[in-house]
Image (cartoon, helix red, strand yellow):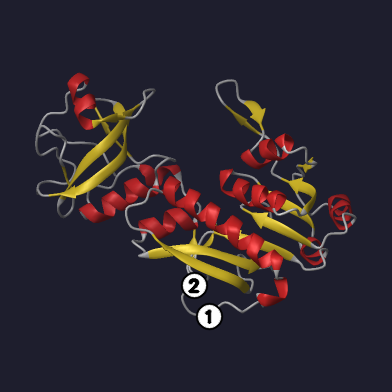
Amino acid sequence: MRLAFMGTPDFAVPTLDALVAAGHDIAAVYSQPPRPAGRGKAPQPGAVHKRADALGLEVRCPVSLRDPQAQAEFVALGLDAAIVAAYGLILPQPVLDAPRLGCLNVHGSLLPRWRGAAPVQRAILAGDVETGVTIMQMEKGLDTGPMRLIRSTPVAGKTAGELTAELAAMGAAMMVEVLADFDAFPAIAQPDEGVTYAAKIEKAEARIDFSAPAGQVVRQILAFNPAPGAFFETQGERVRVLAAEVADGRGEPGTVLDDALTIACGTGAIAPGRVQRAGRGAMSVAELLRGFAVPAGTRLAGA
């Protein structure tokens, strides 16, 4: 098929690669404009933009698709379909209507649960047993379109980074499958029940809430690994917790209970496994404590 691909972050790259490998004609790749990044804050292209350049594909980075000229240029591509994965810009109706088969989205949840910007992190935070990928026919509403294919995978114990990578690979394979036999995957309306919204992750949410039950604290740590990174503060320094387990113990929430950095929560306790000091690499708790004493009785600054 003659396609446009629309995506920006790492999550979308496997789908672009899969479409190219399947022999589809990628007429253009749409990605969000380069953003300031790094110490020099120089504009840096996103992961999809970089991959498209490496593949020799035309990349377009409109600030908005509401501009009539941008819409006319999209229509002029003469597409069979547009494939969207974490693009980050709203598609106006003229864009949605332009391709012969419409616009298809790779969404990282079991719709209608977790419509919106951060479905992976919200599924982990909520303690969902499973999540998955939905191939959705796009319409004007926020992830409200009918579904063509949906598959699930367990959530338990996975970080947001691990789960995102798994769903990205799943979604890429599913999209290729749908395009290979489009009529075999009719669009089915989403159910009216079970709708939830995955609000964008705010940096303030990453401060660990030790007043919560230990299981919820562990989910917070998993959901914010790798970014923005769940953290506590002690001795004027921020320490990110990259991995932790529920542990035995009780005490005032946020209190260090022993010399192995077991930390009391609202109920139970957590035992961090991997941590990271500001400006340093990830390390074990034992490595941290050799050069940064956090003795039993220390009260950590969380939420």
In screen coordinates, is 82 left or right of 228? right
Residue drawn at x 40%, y 65% is 130
Residue drawn at x 63%, y 74% is 146
Query: Which quadrant holds the N terminus?
Result: bottom right
Regarding mark 1 in the picture, which secondary structure is present there? loop
In screen coordinates, is 6 left or right of 195? right
Residue nearer the viewer, 79 or 37: 79
Q: Residues within 10 Å of mark 2 (few under 14, many from 20)?
A: few
Residue type at mark 2?
Val
Residue type at mark 1?
Asp
The percent position of residue 201, horizontal first and vertical second, equals 47, 49
Residue beneath label 2, please? 195
Residue beneath label 1, please? 192
The percent position of residue 52, horizontal first and vertical second, equals 71, 40
Residue nearer the viewer, 21 or 39: 21
Instruction: Determine which quarter of the picture holds residue 267.
Output: bottom left
Mark 1 → mark 2, Cα distance in angstroms: 7 Å
Q: Are the residues at dot 1 and dot 2 in contact (C-beta closer than 8 Å)?
A: yes
